[in-house]
Every structure is written in C-alpha cells, then in structure tokens.
C-alpha cells in the first residue's frame, strides 16, 4: 500500500495536490486528526482484496490541536510496517499573502491580534518537523496548477518502482532560488550566451546556444564536476531510503546556461539507468 501524507503551508496548493493523487486512484482524506492516522491506516491495510491500495491524507495547521500527537502517530505507522511518504508544499511569504488576498479566504491561524504575515510564519514553525521529514518538497511560488499536478503525479507513480528519482531544475537567480532544492549549483560564472546578440533570442535547448556552450572548456569542466559530485554522493542518499532528490542549476535569467546544463545532466544520469525528471522554471 502506498501511504502519502500531504502537508504544507496554507495557500501553497495542498488541495490541488490531493486532487492530483485522487485522479490517479488514491483514496484521499483531507484534515484527518493526526491521532486517527494509525487507526485508519490499519483499516486500509487490513481490508480484504486490497480494496484500498493507495492512500493520501491531508494534514496541516487546521489540525493543530492534534499536531502534538503526530510524532506518536507516525511511530505507530512504522511499528505496523506501514511505509509512509510526506509531500510538503511551500511558497514565498509574499506569494502566500497575495493568494490569500486574491481569494479572500481566512488563514487558519489568523485572528484579530495576528497579522497575516505573522500567521504564515507561525504556521511554518508548527509544520517545520513535517517539512524536514518530507520525501518531496515542492516550492509552488512560480508553479502553475498544471505543473504542480504533474509533479505530484510523477512522484506518486515513481513510488511504484524502486530507486531514486532525480529532478533537475533550471532557474534564474534574478527570480529567486527554489525553496525545494536539495542541491543548488550556481553557474553564473560561465560564459553567458545572452551577451552574444545573435544568441539572445534562443534558450539552452536550442542548437545555436548548445554549440556556443559546447565550445567552452570551463562549461565542460563544470558539467563534469557536478556529475562527479552527484555520482559520489547519490549512493548515500539511496542507502538512506531517499526516493526523490532535487538538483537546481541557476544562472542569471534561467534561459541559457542553466537550461543547457540541466538537459545534459538529466541525459547523463538517465543513460546510467537512473530515473530523471526535468523542469525549466523560467521557460514558459
């Protein structure tokens, strides 16, 4: 049985994530009291004919009366041999504030004495243990609902096969660093195709930019050293039972150098038999 816990900051997209899991056959319950987790998981696991194979439970600060009991509930799941995964969603404070203002919904920790920004920060503190234990963290700051559904579905489907999945993500530093990255490599020191007027209109996926970057020895050295670093440490993550690792590659605008390297890295590790996914955050 696949057993997922979907959590995260209010306004970060948990409802969309649960709907994405429901669309691929998960039995989903939102806002289940944490104390009932072991009981429900036991019922699902013991059902005849495997009536419920995949379960996703939404937990967040609406459940804060019961959050103190969550560590004991998770330990009870482990004691029963139920292997759970946590998906944690987050976004930048300013984006969450904007989303709440646009939807005019009340933040669950908001009261007459607490401003919205402080409510968001208090929520982060309460949910910090869940975020640290997450198998997958998704920063939805610049993620569309379609992209979020795709990421969640890909992760859930990847659970059906053993091994580590690598998500390679390109981004532009001028738009902010991804919150969900496990590793971030800064490649702004490499030659920038943007300053070649004839290349500015292209991206790192296009042949003219690829040809330009292929010719530079320091670009190839950066690629080789990132590969070497990951090849050395990935086995350690696999031994720790990690199933998902996000490697972010950043350049200034997220159009050329980072895109080029992400594609090459994904191809390199796919050729080695690893499961890879690619996301170019700034290419829309």
Image (cartoon, rainbow, N blue to C red):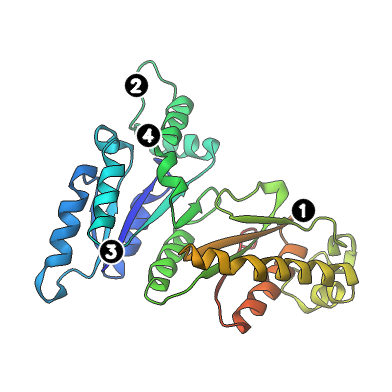
The reply, left or right, for residue 29 in relation to residue 212 is left
Looking at the figure, which quarter contains the C terminus?
bottom right
Height in image: 246 above or below 220?
above
**Residues at marks 1 and 2, CA–CA distance in whole angstroms:** 40 Å
Q: Position of residue 264 (x, y in %)?
A: 70, 75
Nearer the N terminus, badge 3 or badge 2?
A: 3
Which mark is nearer the camera, 2 or 4? 2
Front-most of residues 57 and 81: 81
- Rendered residue at 16%/55% (across/down): 40
- Rendered residue at 55%/78% (across/down): 274
Quadrant in the rendering for residue 220: bottom right
**Residues at marks 4 and 3, CA–CA distance in whole angstroms:** 26 Å
- What kind of element bears circle 1? loop
- What kind of element bears circle 2? loop
Q: Position of residue 91 (x, y in %)?
A: 51, 44
Asked if marks 2 and 4 touch (Cβ < 8 Å), the reply is no
Nearer the N terminus, badge 4 or badge 3?
A: 3
Q: Position of residue 269 (x, y in %)?
A: 63, 77
Which mark is nearer the camera, 4 or 3? 3
Nearer the N terminus, badge 3 or badge 1?
A: 3
Nearer the N terminus, badge 2 or badge 4?
A: 4
- Rendered residue at 49%/37% (across/down): 98
Front-most of residues 205 and 68: 68
Asked if marks 1 and 2 touch (Cβ < 8 Å), the reply is no
User: Can residue 256 be seen?
Assistant: no
- How dense is the environment of label 4, judged by Cα within 10 Å: few (below 14), some, or many (20 and up)? few
Q: Which mark is residue 104?
A: 4
Q: Which mark is residue 214?
A: none
Quadrant in the rendering for residue 183: bottom right
Q: According to the image, label 3 marks what residue? A: 22
Q: According to the image, label 2 marks what residue? A: 111
């Amino acid at each position: 049985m696949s057993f997922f816990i979907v959590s995260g900051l209010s306004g970060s997209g948990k409802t969309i994530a649960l709907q994405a899991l429901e669309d691929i056959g998960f039995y989903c319950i939102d806002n289940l009291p944490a104390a009932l987790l072991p009981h429900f998981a036991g019922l699902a696991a013991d059902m005849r004919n495997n009536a419920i194979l995949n379960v996703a439970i939404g937990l967040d600060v609406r459940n804060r009366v019961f959050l103190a009991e969550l560590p004991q509930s998770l330990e009870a799941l482990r004691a029963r041999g139920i292997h759970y995964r946590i998906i944690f969603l987050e976004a930048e404070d300013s984006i969450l504030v904007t989303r709440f203002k646009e939807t005019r919904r009340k933040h669950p920790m908001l009261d007459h004495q607490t401003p919205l920004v402080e409510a968001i920060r208090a929520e982060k503190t309460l949910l910090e243990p869940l975020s640290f234990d997450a198998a997958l963290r998704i920063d939805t700051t610049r993620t569309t609902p379609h992209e979020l559904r795709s990421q969640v579905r890909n992760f859930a489907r990847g659970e059906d096969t053993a091994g580590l999945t690598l998500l390679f993500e390109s981004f532009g530093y001028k738009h902010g660093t991804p919150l969900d990255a496990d590793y971030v490599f800064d490649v702004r020191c490499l030659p920038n195709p943007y300053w070649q007027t004839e290349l500015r209109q292209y991206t790192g996926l296009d042949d003219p930019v690829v040809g330009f970057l292929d010719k530079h020895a320091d670009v190839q050295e950066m690629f080789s050293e990132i590969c070497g670093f990951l090849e050395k440490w990935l086995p350690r993550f696999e031994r720790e039972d990690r199933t998902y690792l996000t490697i972010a590659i950043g350049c200034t605008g997220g159009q050329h150098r980072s895109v080029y390297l992400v594609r090459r890295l994904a191809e390199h590790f796919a050729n080695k038999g690893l499961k890879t996914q690619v996301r170019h955050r700034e290419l829309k």
